[in-house]
Image (spheres, helix red, strand yellow):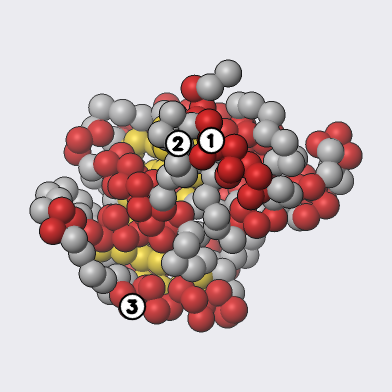
Amino acid sequence: MSESSDERRLPPVLTGRKALVVGVANDRSIAWGCAQAMRRVGAELALTYLNEKARLHVEPLARQLEAPVFMPLEVRDSTQVDALFEAISNHWGKLDILVHSIAFAPREALQGRVIDCPRDGFLAAMEVSCWSLLDLARRAEPLMREGGTIITMSYLGANEVVENYGIMGPVKAALESAVRYLAVELGPKGIRVHAVSPGPLATRAASGIRDFDELMERVVVSAPTRRLVTIEEVGAACAFLASPYAAAMTGETLYIDGGFHILA
């Protein structure tokens, strides 16, 4: 992994920390930006891949970051979730950081009207995109004996109606609410919980949103910074949240969108 001189000067604020990053699909995914940033400032990583097709793209990235734990994870398969946390417990005996960067909705649920969303589509979106955070956090809790940080990915559609975002808007709203409840419940144990809300990025997950290119164009024209954010910038924000610099912060939804969310 090549580094600029500025990157080499970053303080190793996560040295000794063990981080599980869930949701790396390829080198354009937000989770990859998070994994790179955390490794750059000293964290040791565990990465997962969804299935054998995804493994082809993710395994070289895991090698690049020297991840000692690299396992399949379909969050609806409790056997795989059990195996992942058993491996983390056996290899590290603890966990300091959990990055939850996964979301899913069937195409018919995502592209149709919210009012017409089929029950099974809604339940699938909620299970993968929201309930899985609760499940992973519950399993991470006993491994975060010295405290820790849990971070998940949201989007502006949780709080505003975003055209073509469909059922994911209500699901992300539930996710942000879950973050606040987790922050209160886990705070006494020194575990901080955050949602990060990036601006639109050309990721594989975003490809299922109709007219997404037009949405990105509107952001470039309207956002105060007049550009899209990058996965590296999202990753840097997540590394900050997991670091001692953010020790007094929890329960937040942090927007990394060039200021687009402040516009009426």
Secondary structure state at the residue bearing disc 2: loop
* Comes first in the chain, label 2 or label 1: 1
Q: Mark 3 points at which residue?
A: 63
Decide which of 226, 194 is in the foreground and name it: 226
Q: Nearer the viewer, mark 2 or mark 3?
A: 2
Amino acid type at mark 2: Arg
**What label sits on residue 226 in the rendered view?**
2
Q: Residue at x 20, y 64 (%)?
A: 3
Amino acid type at mark 3: Arg
Q: Which residue is drawn at 88% across and 39% down?
A: 116
Decide which of 262, 29 is in the foreground and name it: 262
Marks 2 & 3, CB-CB < 8 Å contact: no
Marks 1 & 3, CB-CB < 8 Å contact: no
Q: Residue at x 41, y 53 (%)?
A: 231
Q: Which residue is drawn at 83% across and 52% down?
A: 108
Image position of 132 with respect to 63: above or below: above
Q: Name the residue under label 1.
A: 221
Marks 2 & 1, CB-CB < 8 Å contact: yes
Secondary structure state at the residue bearing disc 1: helix
Query: From mark 2 to mark 1, how far is it between C-alphas?
Result: 6 Å
